Amino acid sequence: MDQKIIDNYVKAGKIASKVREEAKSLVKPGMKLIDLAEKLEKKIRDLGGVPAWPVNISTNEIAAHYSPAKGDDSVFGEKDLVKVDIGVAVDGYIADTTVSVALDKEDAKLVEAAEKALDEALKLVRPGADVADIAAKIEETIVSMGFKPIVNLTGHGLDQYTVHSEPKIPNHKGDFHYLLEEGEAIAIEPFATRGRNFITESDENRALTYTVLEEKPVRSMEARIILQDMRSREGMPFTDRWLKADGIKLKLALRELMEKECIQPYRILKGDSKISQAEHTVLVLDKPIVTTR
């Protein structure tokens, strides 16, 4: 891996780490989710990065893909378990990190399970390490603390402007044999729960974040402007909060872009019980670098 690329990954990681720690201090009952998201996204930009995706703020049984949209007035409850998933890009090289905040002390051990599983998994990362061993260690650690790993959510590779690439890093034991290669960037992200060990798309059938798949001719001016404005993101996800259109015009433009398969929606993912998550980005080098610590 070229030193300049390493430097970009490390810079992104340092920014993400600072923003993650700020998130931990800001999450309080009664705070609006949209206020937290916008504060953290501004912090990323102020520190010299670009949000690699809209800050995801998933509470309780929601596992992923919740980022407050325009007009979202939801607030944190007294007993929420809050997962804040932060992505930072520097020249397209991405740091991916998540922290879980337990507003109810009864969830502290659930948070600890994901964090401990992450710590144990990171100890195994090196060139030539078998992903199957990392996955087994994640499950072993979570189960030893009395919880279950989410089996259909995985860690993943990262690449320039690419949020999810190979290899996958599962959270449970299985026949996942892949040997990590020097120069890869990976995100390891254990999820733990008391409930069922898998997630599904929410019945709400709505999306809060999107990514541009392809620019095609579209009918409405608003849809054309969205494609033009999001071009610089090189396929990284975006939110309607970053768009100029509003109201029904925004809704119709997004619908047109989805129907034309110009953009891909990310559906909200949910379990049936509270879910915790911990995540770091690591560069697979002779001396691995956890960029987001």
Image (cartoon, rainbow, N blue to C red):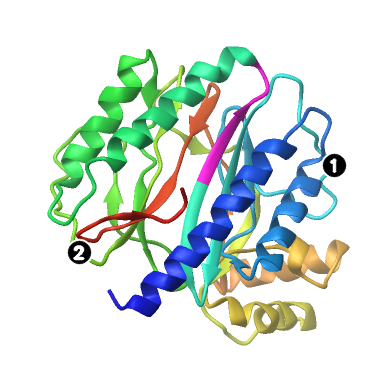
Quadrant for residue 44, please give it. Answer: bottom right
Residue 267 visible to the viewer: no
On residue 182, which mark appears? Answer: 2
Residue, x 32% and y 18% (percent of image)? 143
Counting other residues with Cα less than 10 Å from the Cα at mark 1, is it few (<14), some (14-19), or many (20 or more)? Answer: few
9 lies above or below 122: below
Q: Nearer the viewer, residue 178 or 137?
A: 137
Image side of residue 238 versus residue 290, left or right: right
Q: How many marks?
A: 2
Left/right of residue 222 with respect to residue 84 in the rendered view: right
Q: Nearer the viewer, residue 120 or 263?
A: 120
For badge 2, the amino acid type reads Glu
Q: Nearer the viewer, residue 13 or 135?
A: 13
Q: CA distance from mark 1 to mark 2?
A: 45 Å
The amino acid pointed to by label 1 is Asp
Circle 1 or circle 2, nearest the eye: 2
Identify the residue under disc 1: 73
- Which image quarter: residue 29? top right
Residue 207, horizontal then vertical, whole percent: 64, 52
